[in-house]
Amino acid sequence: MKKFAIDIVLLPPDPVMNIALEWNRELCKGRPDNIVLNKTNYLPHITMAMGCVSESRLQRANEMLRTLANHHKMLELQISNVKSIGTASGNTVIALDIENNVGLTELHESIVKAFQTLLSQDATAGDMYDPPPIETSSIEWINRFIPHYCFEHFWPHITLGFGAPPSNFQPLSFQASRLAICHLGNYCTCRSILGESRLK
């Protein structure tokens, strides 16, 4: 049976997307193998939960997304920092670090608890949007998100790419209301929206 490796995400508003894309373009200069973000099929995003869902359960997943969206308010979020994270492959990942707050924590925990019954942790390269080869770390991240990267280990962030952090970062606040289920590609990029709802 066909499965999708998915990410339940918050999609930031256009001003934050534009900042992420601007810094991504800087990171891509002189590095053609970098992650390339855009607003169509490489969406900047904040991961809420990851896993694998069968095609037969996708409609149920979208119904669950709408129910959760109706029970949570639009979020006020703050990007407080830029983080550099080393990877096993030797790359340095740059990400916008988002402050966790009560509303974001409640939404994250509600999503993980609700989707746990639908998600499996058995993603393979064939379940990804992109064709092989797929980075092993991408598959591991998806399959280990529950329980290793959620609840007390939850780190809200927006990945910008590989390289050195921007020197002109300024903290900023924004509102987020777009909740989506995305089909994941290599490097856990959001390649295709499979369903979307709006927080109240």
Image (cartoon, grey):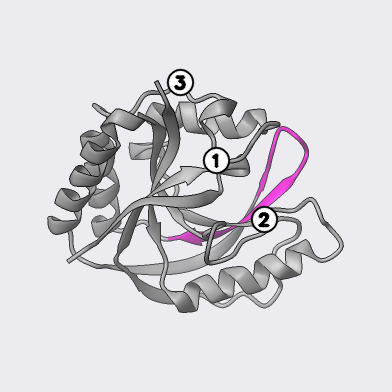
Q: Which residue is mark 2?
A: 161
Say which of 78 and 6 sits in front. 6
What amino acid type should be assigned to the residue bearing mark 1? Tyr
Q: Which residue is mark 1?
A: 129
What amino acid type should be assigned to the residue bearing mark 2? Gly
Q: Relative to residue 7, is residue 175 depicted above or below?
A: below
Say which of 79 and 139 sits in front. 139
Depth check, mark 1 against mark 3: the one in front is 1
At x 38% / y 37%, what residue is drawn?
Answer: 150
Distance of mark 1 from mark 3, alpha carbons? 15 Å
Q: Position of residue 166 (x, y in %)?
A: 70, 69
110 horizontally vs 5: left or right: left
What amino acid type should be assigned to the residue bearing mark 3? Asp
Q: Residues within 10 Å of mark 3 (few under 14, many from 20)?
A: some
At x 29% / y 29%, what residue is drawn?
Answer: 56
Range of the magenta residues? 85-98
Q: Which residue is mark 3?
A: 122
Residue 89, quarter of the rendered image: top right
